[in-house]
Image (cartoon, coloured by chain):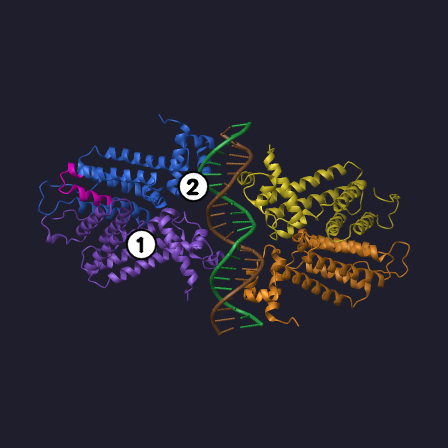
Chain colours: A yellow, B orange, C blue, D purple, E green, F brown
DNA sequence: ACTAGCGGGACGACCCGTTTGT
DNA sequence: ACAAACGGGTCGTCCCGCTAGT
């Protein structure tokens, strides 16, 4: 289908540069140079830079969904902690540069822009995953709690970029525990997990 | 001191435009046009665009500190909720465009850049405020809890920009309650507030 | 001979686009896309864009000659009026965009360019037709009058593009009458035409 | 007012190049190089190339109006022949490249484009001048005759570009004589057709 | 101290005509 | 017939200096 090697090289190069340096800061010339393609080839696959940015966003979303799908194999509660652990691991990587969606949104102020809509869609998906897992795990208030988990997710993405990673990781684990803890009186099912991972 | 009306107009205009549209997306020419100053005047006060961005960051930090100082008059616990309520109110404003520091960081990937250092400093200040208030309110684990409040703060800034404001607000209040709740057994000083505002 | 269907489609498409939008404004990619041929096929039939432009000019000339040939069946005098009526009819068509040769000359300033030479040749042919018809109709000054008819032809082509068609048509008919009118004293052959068409 | 030397140099250079080589064929870079201005200066005075083209058209129109105004000092009939003689003289100049308006129209197919509207306005002015002079000279049919003079004008502009100048000049003079010749009473051969169509 | 304008040159996105391989 | 490569060209914007005038 879309199995053009040139297109793949362009998208991969763009993803790396856009994420590392920002969308506006990376020019087409640089992308085609590092991808080793001709200008005409680039514009054949992506009629405009915005189309490339859009494809970059869609690609990021697809990758995160694939990663999450793997975590979804476990039990609901474990899946949730696994997802957040995965994000923490990602956040401590050498190339980490924050959340690609939040960063892109910072450069695309117009909420009606296609890039923003792709971001919105991704966020709805992420919240949906949290909610579904909470429902499956029998959480009494999955909707509100999913919203809180989204807060936590965004906070950790920012934190790993701008604060000290170990502290962030510790705080994320503590916060997740607090959020997933049953409301005080309903502590029937003893929850014995004493350390994620 | 720096009470030049021209300089103030430049900074105010730049702050408005940088925040609303992003730093890279706003050119010097546009700033001087909308500020109604001459180019020479601009470069007299700000030797380079980066200097202006730096001043913009410092100015944002100063404003947030002034706002927080007002909230600090109340009791520690009240002060904390007031601070988060203020941020929620800010997040629902018509010109809201996310956290200026997070947005700027998205456009300045180099952690060694002066702009990033100003951001770091601001974040250290914010965390310090949270920690101090937690200490003053007798919280048993002020350091880790301050880290969690930072997560919450960043999450809400992102959420108000990219998600539905009412849901975010509700989630923030619930999360703050959870975070500030006394660990079950140690409920000496009964804090009976069951819902902010 | 040159009965390749691909070639014909290319030439037809190019003629339509060149005439409607100008030569420089239409790119090869657009032509091959709208003609539905491959790039290699295009460059097989037309080694360069200039060759295509040249073929476009030659084609236009051939078509005009074919049209004129039909009019030449009539009596000389009638043939002349028929030729100008044909041009007026052409000038009021929905796709009319002026004289293709004049338009092309506007984009090819160099008189030595092959395109220009094709234009020159076409104009010599047109003037020759006028002169021959004037001679055949017994006009006393066919050479100078042919030059005047060329002026009229060019004027009407411009007029139909840039002025109001009905006024132009009326003016063309009146001018043609004036031009073809016998000089006062030499009114031998009564000319009985009482209304073209 | 608009007495900026840089702007004047740009416009003068653009007029020369646009007229000699065509609008699309001349790039901004070339204009600013030959005018000796900076790109920023160019875009300060002309926000886009189209604005420059528009100014070029308006400038040409103004110049032709100024030239015509000088000829208008004479008696109506003399003024008309002077105007056409002026155009013939212009047409035989070394830099002659046809009518700037017709050439520009060839490159701007859209009749709604500002450039085209400037052209339309100029043509209305020219026809108005002819008509006024015909009225002042007591011509019995100034409106239709003005239309014919427009035909003649356009024809001569094209002819001087694409045909042999001396023949064109002769033909123009002869045609002008025919067009301005007093009707009826000064001629033996009555003109029987009193209204085409 | 402030304004207005101009010069400079690098870079932005995007399109051009053309050739080659498959 | 399609995809890719190529290099140069298009218009336009960038940040930044400098000079002259008030």
C98 w.r.t. C9: above or below? below
Q: Looking at the picture, how far across and down is residue D168, in whole percent?
A: 23, 47
Quarter of the image with the N terminus of chain B in it? bottom right
- Does residue E20 appear to the left or right of B50 in the view shown? left
Name the residue beneath numbered marker 1: D123
Nearest the eye: D70 or D149: D70
Visible in this render: residue C38?
no
What residue is rendered at 62% in x and 57% in y? B20
Nearest the eye: B24 or B188: B24
Helix, strand or loop under label 1: helix
Disc 2: which chain?
Answer: C
Q: Is residue A27 magenta?
A: no
Visible in this render: residue C105?
yes
Callout 2: few (<14), some (14-19), or many (20+) C-alpha neighbours within 10 Å?
some
Nearest the eye: C29 or A74: C29
**Which region shows up in magenta?**
C134-150
């Amino acid at each position: 289908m879309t199995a053009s090697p040139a297109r793949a090289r362009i998208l991969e190069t763009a993803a790396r540069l856009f994420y590392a340096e920002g969308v506006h800061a990376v020019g087409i010339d640089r992308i085609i140079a590092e991808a080793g393609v001709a200008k005409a080839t680039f514009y054949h696959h992506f009629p405009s830079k915005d189309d490339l940015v859009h494809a970059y966003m869609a690609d990021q979303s697809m990758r995160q969904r694939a990663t999450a799908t793997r975590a979804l194999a476990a039990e609901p509660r474990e899946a949730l902690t696994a997802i957040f652990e995965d994000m923490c691991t990602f956040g401590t990587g050498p190339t980490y540069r924050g959340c690609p969606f939040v960063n892109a949104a910072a450069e695309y102020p117009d909420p009606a822009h296609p890039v923003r809509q792709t971001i919105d869609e991704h966020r709805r998906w992420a919240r949906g995953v949290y909610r579904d897992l909470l429902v499956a795990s029998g959480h009494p208030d999955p909707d509100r709690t999913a919203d809180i988990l989204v807060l936590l997710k965004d906070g950790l993405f920012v934190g790993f970029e701008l604060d000290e990673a170990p502290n962030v990781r510790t705080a994320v684990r503590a916060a997740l525990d607090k959020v997933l803890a049953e409301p005080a009186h309903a502590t029937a099912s003893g929850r014995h997990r004493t350390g994620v991972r």
